[in-house]
Amino acid sequence: MAALFVDQNGKQLLHIVTRLDLLWKPVKRMIRFVLTDRRRYILMSSDTGLSPEDIIFLYGCRFKMVAD
């Protein structure tokens, strides 16, 4: 578990996260799961090289585009 400050919509928000790299059987490869305390999200990435901060930031960008 780690405490991270992530830029979301121009604001620095504190997230308490847990990162897990697990072999996910449906896709038969390693997936990085990031569990956040904020709204209890579970985020997934097939790029295990991304940091939890990057994954949270990229999901934030994606949902901002969908909402616009």
Image: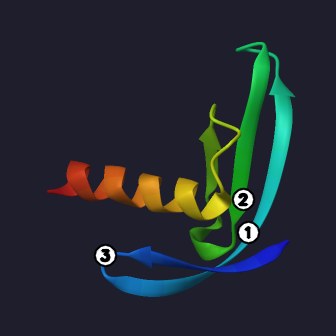
Answer with mark 1 or mark 3, whichever residue precedes in sequence: 3
Question: Could you tell whether 35 is left or right of 15 in the image?
Answer: right
Q: Residue at x 81, y 16 (%)?
A: 25
Quadrant for the C terminus, please.
bottom left
Measured Cα–Cα span from mark 1 to mark 3: 19 Å
Judging by the rendered image, the residue that carries numbered circle 3 is: 9
In this rendering, the answer to whether 34 lies above or below 28 is below
The amino acid type found where label 3 is placed reads Asn
Mark 1 lies on a secondary structure that is strand
Determine whether label 1 and label 2 are within 8 Å by CB: yes
Q: Position of residue 55 (x, y in %)?
A: 56, 53
The amino acid type found where label 2 is placed reads Leu
Q: Residue at x 51, y 84 (%)?
A: 13
Q: Position of residue 14 (x, y in %)?
A: 59, 85
Q: Residues within 10 Å of mark 3 (few under 14, many from 20)?
A: few
Mark 3 lies on a secondary structure that is loop
Answer with mark 2 or mark 3, whichever residue precedes in sequence: 3
Measured Cα–Cα span from mark 2 to mark 3: 20 Å
Q: Position of residue 1 (x, y in %)?
A: 85, 71
Residue 17's label in the rendered image is 1
Measured Cα–Cα span from mark 1 to mark 2: 5 Å
Determine whether label 2 and label 3 are within 8 Å by CB: no
In this rendering, the answer to whether 49 lies above or below 23 is below
Please name whichever residue, 35 or 53, is drawn nearer the observer in this view of the structure. 53
Judging by the rendered image, the residue that carries numbered circle 2 is: 35
Mark 2 lies on a secondary structure that is strand
The amino acid type found where label 1 is placed reads Val
